[in-house]
């Protein structure tokens, strides 16, 4: 990548990416922000196909993608930075017309889960939910468990999948998506979705991945280091006056829009890493162990120097 080519940064157009937008004017080199409404799984594919250079996505999706890759060549990226400290709050939802599904326990009989893409956060967390609820089969079939996975696409397709919009009939019984992004579709008696529960990730929810083609030695790459400095400035600007950012969010300036009430409720628990460079190895070990227990990755998977899970190490948690 020459200095004339922009650094292509993939992101999910949600409120957790506000500091990225605030950071963009700080970058000394050209930067192109590319939205991925279908989430982390799509960004993994794009990193591997050299369509983007850096991406900010969900922790569990990054780890699962690396641990399930067949060989170093297929990995295509490493996890190099930390973004959000707090867990992600996933809403579990179904169609409002589904009278047969009233709460999470009903999902034992209604096993079709809609996911944006294979390997996405919505896919991985479905298995974490099933593991926590004890739904997964024991033994050699535990990886498929009692879930029927239906990849449906971006958020709108997931909504249509559980409501049967378009006359196709429901293609999923439930799906999981970030709480505040989903809330406008289940809050009220006339909305298309019904909220039946929630689950929190047991780890910091967002991390930063970088292409191994663009950044083969990320720990010493000066361009990547400058990018982290700019991201730190974006986080700092957000923390200095979050209400200014919230006002812009409510007005829809960041490619997504939330009510002022929801934005301020989210702000109470939103905690970003002030220093974004590097990944905590203990955190990644914890994620790996949880994904193994849920059958998302093989029981023998380990975080090693070559796994890419800790592309740049940091000392703090």
Image (cartoon, rainbow, N blue to C red):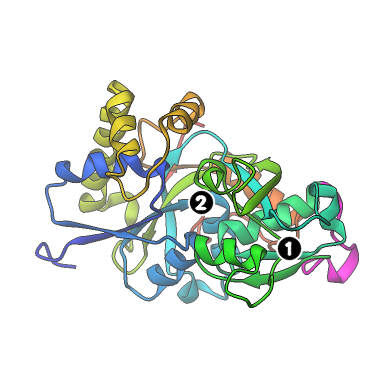
Q: Is residue 96 left or right of residue 49?
A: right
Instruction: List x then y, in percent, for residue 42.
Output: 46, 67
The residue positioned 33% from the left and 73% from the top of the image is 50
**Looking at the image, which is closer to me, 72 or 209?**
209
- The quarter in which the N terminus is drawn is bottom left
**Looking at the image, which is closer to me, 85 or 198?**
198
Q: How many marks?
A: 2
Residue under numbered circle 1 = 173
| Part of the protein shown in magenta | 133-145
Q: Is residue 247 left or right of residue 141?
A: left
The residue positioned 52% from the left and 44% from the top of the image is 184
Local SS, label 1 = loop
Taking the magenta stretch, the answer to whether it contains residue 45 is no
Crowd class of label 1 (few under 14; some 14 to 19; many from 20; radius 10 Å): many
**Looking at the image, which is closer to me, 104 or 240?**
104
Q: Along the polypeptide, which appears first: circle 2 or circle 1?
A: 2
**Looking at the image, which is closer to me, 216 or 43?**
43
Magenta highlight: main SS: loop
The residue positioned 49% from the left and 75% from the top of the image is 74
Spatial separation of the CA atoms under disc 2 and disc 1? 23 Å
Residue under numbered circle 2 = 58
């Amino acid at each position: 990548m020459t200095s004339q080519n922009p650094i292509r940064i993939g992101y999910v157009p949600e409120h957790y990416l506000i500091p990225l937008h605030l950071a963009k004017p700080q970058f000394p080199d050209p930067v192109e922000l590319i939205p991925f409404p279908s989430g982390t799984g799509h960004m993994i594919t794009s990193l591997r196909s050299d369509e983007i250079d850096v991406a900010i996505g969900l922790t569990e999706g990054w780890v699962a993608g690396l641990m399930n890759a067949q060989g170093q060549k297929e990995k295509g990226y490493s996890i190099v930075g930390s973004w959000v400290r707090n867990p992600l709050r996933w809403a579990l939802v179904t169609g409002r017309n589904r009278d047969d599904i009233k709460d999470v326990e009903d999902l034992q009989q209604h096993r079709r889960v809609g996911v944006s893409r294979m390997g996405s956060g919505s896919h991985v967390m479905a298995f974490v939910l099933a593991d926590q609820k004890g739904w997964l089969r024991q033994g050699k079939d535990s990886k498929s468990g009692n879930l029927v996975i239906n990849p449906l696409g971006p958020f709108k397709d997931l909504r249509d999948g559980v409501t049967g919009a378009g006359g196709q009939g429901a293609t999923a019984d439930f799906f999981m998506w970030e709480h505040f992004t989903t809330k406008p579709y289940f809050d009220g008696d006339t909305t298309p979705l019904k909220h039946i529960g929630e689950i929190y990730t047991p780890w910091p929810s967002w991390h930063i991945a970088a292409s191994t083609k663009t950044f083969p030695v990320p720990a010493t790459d000066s361009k990547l280091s400058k990018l982290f400095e700019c991201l730190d400035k974006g986080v700092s600007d957000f923390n200095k006056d979050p209400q200014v950012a919230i006002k812009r969010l409510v007005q829809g300036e960041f490619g997504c829009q939330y009510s002022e009430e929801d934005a301020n409720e989210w702000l109470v628990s939103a905690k970003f890493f002030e220093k974004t460079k590097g990944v905590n190895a203990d955190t990644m070990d914890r994620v790996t162990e949880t994904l193994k227990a849920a059958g998302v990755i093989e029981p023998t998977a380990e975080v090693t120097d070559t796994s890419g899970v800790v592309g740049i190490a940091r000392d703090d948690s």
